[in-house]
Amino acid sequence: MRLDHVVINVRADMDVAEATFRDLDFTVTPRGYHTLGSINHLMIFETDYLELIGIPEGGETRRADLLTAPLGINGLVFKSEDVDVTFNHLKELGMDGEPPRSFSRPVEVNRKTVDAKFRTVSVRPDIFPEGRVYFCEHGTPELVWRKEWQNHKNRTTAVTEIVVVATNVAETTTNYANLVNSKAEIQSSDLANIVTDDVLLTIYSPERYHDRYGEAGSDLGDRGSMFGALVFKTEEKSNIIRLSNYDALLEFKN
């Protein structure tokens, strides 16, 4: 199982979010307009990427789900070569949600506008209440992983770890281990790790999470789980940045 991308929901605050990530020295792609009604910007790495997703002015009715979804880190997306096959696998696991859907967005390449095409299928929402967990099949990967977008001034090259915070570490760990078909490493009742082909999933209890991040960590509140941090590989100095506007924690590790 390989990571495709992670998602930060910025709702109607895309202009500020775009500027924020440019100020963090990411190379940010031009704004994309999905046929589903959402807008986005990407930060492309070697084999995965970070997506900012939101809604345009007047687009509240088409993507009302983004208004009700948690602000900040709310999407974990794995690669799929065929989402129909993935959908059948989710059925076998008892994790299937809605059937696969197709969408696109225009991309300008060499002064021509072409469509980047995608098919996705999601895990049933109640399985992972911390956010949207789904699979993406790229019909046109060459329109996403472009060299001019993969070099970042902050020298970030990959997403290496997803930090999940849950009141029930055992149940959350079991669900992720089943989904990615990988054995969990249970460190204790409040910490577990799952290693996929290219990313580490770390599941913490709220207390253990704050042991790692202290006051920089997000507050779980009355939620049962959340995505607590994204960890990136960088060739620069290690650093932790909290984006209070989006209740998102980003850790950069050399």
Image (cartoon, rainbow, N blue to C red):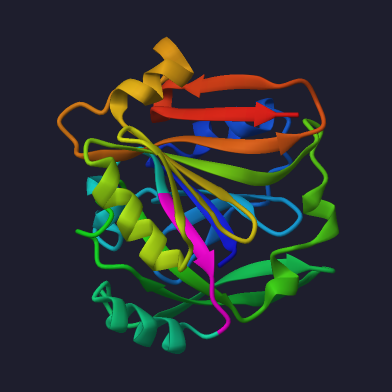
User: Does residue 202 appear in this view?
Assistant: yes
Q: In the rendered structure, does residue 153 fall within the stretch colored magenta?
A: no
Q: Residue furthest top?
A: 215
What span is colored magenta in the figure?
75-81
Name which residue lies at 74% across and 41% down. 27
Q: Would you identify the image quadrant in which residue 36 lies?
A: bottom left
Residue 226 spot, x, y in % from top left: 32, 39
Q: Nearer the viewer, residue 147 or 197?
A: 197
Q: Would you identify the image quadrant in which residue 61 lies?
A: bottom left
Residue 155 spot, x, y in % from top left: 80, 35
Q: Is residue 176 above or below residue 168?
A: below
Name which residue lies at 69% across and 73% down. 141
Q: Is residue 97 above or below residue 69?
A: below
Name which residue lies at 75% across and 34% down. 234
Q: Main secondary structure of the magenta part?
A: strand
Q: Is residue 243 above or below residue 56?
A: above
Name which residue lies at 50% across and 21% down. 242
Q: Is residue 16 left or right of residue 218?
A: right
Q: Nearer the viewer, residue 137 or 87?
A: 87
Q: Residue furthest left?
A: 222
Q: Quadrant of the N terminus?
A: bottom right
Q: Would you identify the image quadrant in which residue 28 lies?
A: top right
Q: Is residue 210 left or right of residue 47?
A: left
Q: Is residue 209 above or below residue 38?
A: above
User: Does residue 60 appear in this view?
Assistant: no
Q: Nearer the viewer, residue 101 or 128?
A: 128
Q: Quadrant of the C terminus?
A: top right
